[in-house]
Image: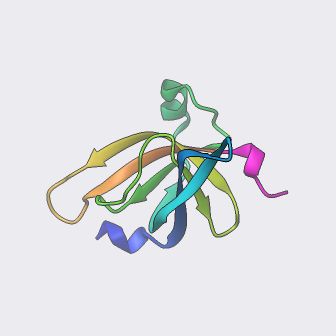
């Protein structure tokens, strides 16, 4: 089953309006997923950078939107660029998120 690969925990953040004139970043929740490097051809077709682009598989019912930020347990942050629903028959149902590492939050 594909969910056996969902071993890395992510926290999902979403922009939520303004507080004292500043944009707020709110926690939506956490979920487990599987992070992997995409093929060079796919990255080129999507117009993304190869060194900071990833595919993240997660449960089909995960509350995510394009533009959300994700953070893993190592304080790496990523921005969701695209979401594909993979609603296959059997045990392979999942969301496929195309994400880019957000260098401004990257740990040194």
What colouring style does the render use?
rainbow
Q: Quadrant of the N terminus?
A: bottom left
Q: Is residue 104 magenta?
A: yes
Residue at x-position 41% and y-position 57%: 57
Q: Is residue 53 above or below residue 60?
A: above
Q: Nearer the viewer, residue 74 or 19?
A: 19
From this viewpoint, which residue is outermost toward the right? 108
Work out whether 64 lies above or below 73: above
Q: Residue at x 37, y 74 (%)?
A: 4
Q: Which picture quadrant has residue 18?
A: top right
Q: Residue furthest left?
A: 89
Magenta stretch bounds: 102-108
- Determine whether, in the image, residue 108 is placed left or right of residue 19: right
- Residue 102 in which image quadrant: top right
Q: Image point 64% across, 33% down: which residue?
A: 49
Going 37% across and 57% down the picture, which residue do you hit?
63
Left or right: 92 as drawn, with respect to 21: left
From the viewer's perspective, is 33 left or right of 37? Answer: left
The answer to whether 50 appears left or right of 31 in the picture is right
Q: Position of residue 2 (x, y in %)?
A: 32, 66
């Amino acid at each position: 089953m594909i969910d056996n690969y969902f071993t890395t925990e992510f926290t999902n953040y979403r922009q939520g309006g303004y507080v004292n004139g500043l944009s707020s970043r709110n926690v939506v929740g956490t979920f487990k997923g599987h992070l992997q490097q995409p093929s060079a051809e796919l990255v080129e077709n999507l117009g993304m950078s190869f060194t900071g682009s990833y595919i993240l598989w997660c449960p089909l019912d995960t509350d995510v939107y394009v533009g959300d930020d994700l953070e893993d347990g190592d304080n790496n942050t990523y921005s969701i660029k695209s979401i594909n629903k993979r609603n296959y028959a059997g045990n392979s149902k999942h969301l496929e998120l195309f994400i880019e590492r957000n260098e401004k939050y990257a740990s040194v």
